[in-house]
Image: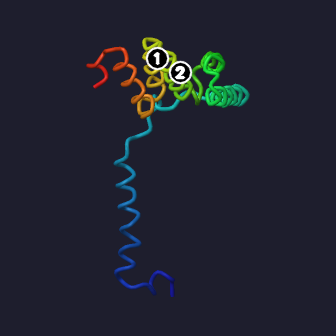
Amino acid sequence: MPAISRLSKSRRVCLLVFPVILCLCLSALEPCSARHYAQVKDYETEHMVFELLKQADEQSDAGQDLKARALLDRAASFDPTGNSAYIHERLCSLYRKLGNYQRAITEGQTALKYDDKQETAIYLLALCYMDNNQYDPAI
């Protein structure tokens, strides 16, 4: 006797209905879009960019914002990579901290070009617009 036939009728119905419901739920999700994912380069390049990003974070945490900016600019020179959105989001944050709001806005927009759903970049961009007295785009 097959194992499924030993189950109660309600459990058999659940086993048959669950996969259908799961498929319907998954199909309702937004389909993957290429614009949300940066083109991944070769491993060596991606690894080097990741290391530059990590070093920039360490420099920024140590209060060395100019060194962090130089590292991030170097990492951004390899765009597009899997970390491009994060690099430009951090550049946006640094330029805002340094008071260069127009450049911060440009970097925030670039971050959203690579990942238009990155919440930190959206938030930072709104703050930059407000700092630059551009209230309409901030909303």
Residue underneath mark 1? 104
- Expressed as whole percent of the image width and height from the top left, the position of residue 96 reads 47, 19
Residue at (32, 15) in percent of width and height: 133
Mark 1 surroundings: few (<14), some (14-19) or many (≥20) residues within 10 A:
many
98 on left or right of 15: right
- Expressed as whole percent of the image width and height from the top left, the position of residue 113 reads 45, 23
Mark 2 surroundings: few (<14), some (14-19) or many (≥20) residues within 10 A:
many
Three-letter amino acid code of the residue under disc 1: Ala
Residue at (45, 15) in percent of width and height: 106
Number of numbered discs on residues: 2
Of the 4 image quadrants, the one containing the C terminus is top left
Depth check, front residue: 23 or 117: 117
Q: Secondary structure at mark 2?
A: helix
Examine the rendered structure and indicate whether residue 122 appears above or below residue 32: above
- Expressed as whole percent of the image width and height from the top left, the position of residue 24 reads 35, 55
As drawn, which residue projects farthest toward the left? 136
Three-letter amino acid code of the residue under disc 2: Leu
- Expressed as whole percent of the image width and height from the top left, the position of residue 79 reads 59, 20
Depth check, front residue: 79 or 89: 89
68 on left or right of 91: right
Q: Secondary structure at mark 1?
A: helix
As drawn, which residue projects farthest toward the front? 63
Q: CB of mark 1 within 8 Å of CB of mark 2?
A: yes
The quarter holding residue 55 reads top right
Residue underneath mark 2? 94
Examine the rendered structure and indicate whether residue 133 appears above or below residue 87: above
